[in-house]
Image (cartoon, helix red, strand yellow):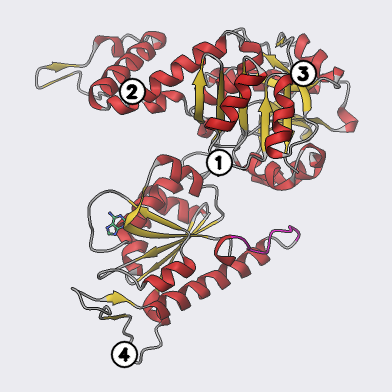
Amino acid sequence: MRFHVMTLFPEMVEQGIGTSITGKAIGQGTIEVHAVNIRDYTEDRHKKVDDYPYGGGAGMLMQAQPVYDCFQAVKQGIVEQRQNGARDRKENEIEGQTGSGLRVVYMTPQGRTFTQQMAEEFSREEDLVILCGHYEGIDERVLEEIVTDYVSIGDFVLTGGELPAMVMIDAVSRLVPGVLHNELSAEVESFHKHLLEFPQYSRPENWHGKEVPKVLLSGNHKMIEEWRLEQSVERTKERRPDLYRKYERLIKCVDWLWKDKLLHMDMIEVIRRGQAELFYSGKDGVLLRDKKSQVCFLTAVSEEAGRKILTEYMPKQIKPEFFVVHQEYLCPLLEEVYGMQSGCACYQAVYTRNVTLRADKSVEIRPLLDDRMEEFLNSCESLGERAYLEERFKSGTVCGAFIKGEIAGFIGIHAQGSMGLLFVKEAFRRRGIASALETEMINRMLALGWLPYAQISIENSEPLALQKKLGLRISDKRLYWYQNK
Ligand code: ADE
């Protein structure tokens, strides 16, 4: 991911972001931070970039011209970089909002308060342009032309936007795959993230007469986990009752969905993995969106309840690209409201046992590194759009099965959390490779505290047989996947 910071103090940004973990990520090429000096673009002979505000008032304003020309240069650089990097992809045109499709964030105390959710959203961008103001602000006319997002880091006023920009870059960077670690575990979060961290202790065992809680020295991991959760819950209740209420709502929702866990495992896992935006949850149904994949999910006790939930609780600005409904009577609603047609009916296969499966030692299975990406993309073309497959590969969740050093097949995890992307090359079929791949994935998911599940089209009997063989339970009810083409 590339950050482009338009500022009067580029060295401040370069120094601040160039150290520690973000500095290392820059060194590895996982992120790029380009600090661009707005002053280089002024047409003023004396390099002036500010002037008095019309109508009077304290201080100076940054003028429109240097900011605008700086942005044009940044945009041009991005277009060229994308053209170079994506010769064979069709995405070298940047279109959309502001005529550029780029997110241009102006750091200002007048903006929306920056949150983890915004960090997640920004981390999905390939390029993020950040504009830092100084003095008393920037001429409104240029803001109107180039800015897509006004963002504040809190209700206080700083002397400029550079520190807020660095705060935002830090929070966004740690979500970019590869910045913290590039393994399956990088995908792991849980809905416990709605809770505050539990207290932590390091050596010595006794400090200022205070002992480390005994349970942490016990070596009993289950007890330690329970103690930590308890501490997190207590702390959140006491210090952040607002967060605790959200957590409680999620727990209640999971309890309700759990009553038919085979049908609802997809929704349960989105919540448990801390990825859910919950729009509605009640005794008559649940409506949520997965923040990672943007897939929407609806379950309802009747067509009438589904209609009420969808029309009253779905935010109007959301135009879903993917939608999963859990009852057939909800299908016509999707056509009526979003014009979505002919969903794919699936069964849900869920691994409900908490024991790992015995691995097939004759097949070596391991997560794939970048050098295998092209091979994965070419082999699995039929499994999805290239950009999606690439994103999944970069998330670090794709594994390969190796036979005598050659890749025989692949498996991965879909963005919303189900096992998938299972593919065995023609020459290696009927040798138990698919079974070995899925066994490995189930074991990896269990190790992360996830409940392994897969969604299988009702027309596809072969994968269903594999799921049964591996001990997954198949839902007797169907769910329906829709895509807005
Ligand atoms: N610029 C000055 N103060 C700011 C704040 N609180 N957030 C974002 N940008 C700013």
Q: Which residue is mark 4?
A: 46
Q: Earlier in the sequence, mark 3 or mark 2?
A: 2
Q: Which residues are magenta?
A: 88-96
Q: Is residue 341 left or right of residue 15?
A: right
Quarter of the figure that contains the C terminus: top right
Q: CA distance from mark 3 to mark 2?
A: 42 Å
List the residue tagged with mark 2. 244
- The residue carrying mark 1 is 316
- Label 3: state its secondary structure: helix
Q: Nearer the viewer, residue 186 or 44?
A: 44
Residue 403 appears in view: no
Please identify, in this view, whether the residue under mark 3 or under mark 1 is nearer the observer: 1
Mark 1 or 2, nearer chain start: 2
Judge the density around disc 3: few (<14), some (14-19), many (≥20) Cα neighbours within 10 Å.
Answer: some
The crowd level at tag 4 (other Cα within 10 Å; few <14, some 14-19, many 20+) is few
**Gap in angstroms between the C-alphas marked 1 and 2:** 27 Å
Image quarter for ligand 1: bottom left
Q: CA distance from mark 3 to mark 1?
A: 43 Å
Q: Residue at x 40, y 54 (%)?
A: 23
Distance CA(mark 1)–CA(mark 4): 50 Å
Residue carrying label 3: 435
Q: Main secondary structure of the magenta part?
A: loop
- Judging from the image, what secondary structure is the residue with disc 1 in? loop
Question: Does the magenta-highlighted stretch encompass residue 92?
Answer: yes
The reply to whether discs 3 and 4 touch (Cβ–Cβ < 8 Å) is no
Q: Secondary structure at mark 4?
A: loop
Give how far apart the Cα atoms at labels 2 and 4 are.
56 Å
- N-terminal label among 2 and 4: 4
Q: Nearer the viewer, residue 160 or 204?
A: 160
Please state which amino acid type lies under the numbered disc 4.
His
For marks 3 and 4, the one nearer the N-term is 4
Residue at position x 23%, y 21% from top? Answer: 238
